[in-house]
Amino acid sequence: MTNLENKIWADLYINLELLLDQYASREYLLGVKALPIPRDRFPEFDAISPIVENSTGWTLLPVAGFLNEELFFEVNANRQFPVTDIIRNSPRFDDKYADRDIRNDRGYTPEPDIFHDVQAHVPFLMNKDYGDFLADVGALGHDIITDHRGLGSELVAHNLKRLQNFSWWTYEFGVEKNKGGTDNIVAVITILIMRFMVLELFHRTTKL
C-alpha cells in the first residue's frame, strides 16, 4: 500500500469517526471496538479475519471487485465475506475503473473499495445474529439460483430479484429505532454509515 492510499484511508476514517457515536448502532460500535481496524492506514486482513472467525465463524475473502449473484450468495452461505484491497480516489482505483465514469466523494463510491467493505460491513460480522442472518440469506440465494426444486427460469429470476432487493435494502440501508426508547434513529447497515452527509440529513428528517 502507498502513503497516499494510507492517507486516503485516514481522512475517510476521521470524517466517519466524528459521526459514529451519534448515528451508528450499538452492534456496529461493538464490532468496531473488537477489531484491529487502524485509523491511519490500511487494515490487515490477516489480523482481522481470525478475530471475526473466532467470534462468528466468518472469514474475509479478498476479491477484485463485485461478484456475480451466484458466487456472492455462495460465499456468504459459506460464511465468507468478500473484501476488496483498493480504495476510492487512488491511482489504483482510477486505473481499474478507467473505462467508467465513476464519481466518488468522501463518503461514497459506487464501486467496492476497502474502506466500505472493512469499515462498514465487517464490524457487523462480529454479531452472531447478524452473521447467522447473512449466512441464511446466502444459502437461500444459492438455493434459488441452483434451482434444485425445478421451479423454472422465470420463477427463479422472479425470486432472485426479490431476494436481491431485500438483501440490498437490508445490508446497505437498514435502520432501527434507538433501543434506549428515544425517538433517535440509528443506522444499522452500511451505506448510511458511509454516506456522511446523507446520514446527517436522514437523522434530522426521519422518524420510525
Image: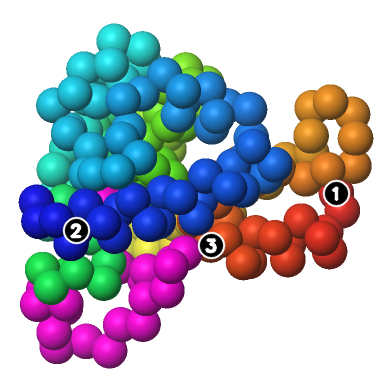
Question: Which callout, 1 or 2, points at the residue further toward the start of the chain?
Answer: 2
Amino acid type at image mark 3 = Arg
Task: Point out the residue furthest to the top here.
Answer: 54
Q: Earlier in the sequence, mark 2 or mark 3?
A: 2
Residue ID for mark 2: 5
Residue drawn 24% across and 25% down?
48
In front of the other: 95 or 12: 12
Q: Secondary structure at mark 1?
A: loop
Q: Which residue is mark 1?
A: 208
Identified at 90% across, 35% down, the residue is 182
Say what amino acid the circle numbered 1 marks.
Answer: Leu
Q: Nearest the camera: 77 or 101?
A: 101
How far is mark 3 from mark 1, CA to CA?
Answer: 20 Å
Colour logic: rainbow
**Which mark's residue is nearer the viewer, 2 or 3?**
2
Res. 75 in view:
no
Magenta segment's dominant SS is loop
Quarter location, residue 47: top left
Return the x and y of residue 180 as percentages of the image width and height. 84, 26
Magenta residues span 94-115
Question: Residue 107 lies in magenta, yes or no?
Answer: yes
Count of marks, rendered view: 3
Q: Which residue is mark 3?
A: 195
State left or right for residue 42 relative to residue 166: left
